[in-house]
Amino acid sequence: MSNIFNTLKSKVGGNKSNEDEQQFSIQPHPAKTNDPADLQRDQLGGGLNSQHEPAGAFHARGPYQPPSHITNNMEQPASRDELRARQAELNK
């Protein structure tokens, strides 16, 4: 019975001298770019890393401009002398 297996093995397997030799093959690499982040899958709750585009800089709205009734009611910023006096008062 084992003789039958040996003959089948020799016919299917080819030369035995090739079995001892190392064989190398080139496999396709999954990366399309040199960025290692391209190989990572999306993670739930990954924040900005979960998207495959920049952090939405081009999809952002313009700067916030408050309405005139808010800007008119704002107090003037303190001068340097007032800020230094307040700093000295707090650092006592």
Image (spheres, rainbow, N blue to C red):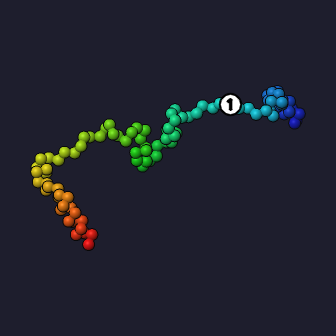
Residue 20 horizontal/vertical position (percent):
81, 34
Residue 81 horizontal/vertical position (percent):
18, 61
| Along the line of sight, the residue nearer the viewer: 27 or 33 | 33
| Along the line of sight, the residue nearer the viewer: 76 or 7 | 76
User: In the visual, does 40 lie left or right of 12?
Assistant: left
Residue 80 horizontal/vertical position (percent):
20, 58
The image quadrant that residue 17 belongs to is top right
User: In the visual, does 77 lie left or right of 40?
Assistant: left
Residue 8 visible? The answer is no
Q: Quadrant of the N terminus?
A: top right
User: In the visual, does 77 lie left or right of 25?
Assistant: left
Query: Looking at the image, is 60 positioned above or below residue 92?
Result: above
The image quadrant that residue 73 belongs to is bottom left
Q: Residue at x 76, y 34 (%)?
A: 22
Q: Which residue lies furthest to the front in this view?
A: 81
- Figure label count: 1
Q: Residue at x 17, y 58 (%)?
A: 78
The kind of secondary structure element at disc 1 is loop
Query: Looking at the image, is 37 positioned above or below residue 89?
Result: above
Q: Quadrant of the C terminus?
A: bottom left
Mark 1: which amino acid? Answer: Ser
| Along the line of sight, the residue nearer the viewer: 55 or 4 | 55
Q: Residue furthest bottom?
A: 92
Q: Which residue is drawn at 68% across and 30% down?
A: 25
Residue 58 visible? The answer is yes
What residue is pinned by disc 1? 25
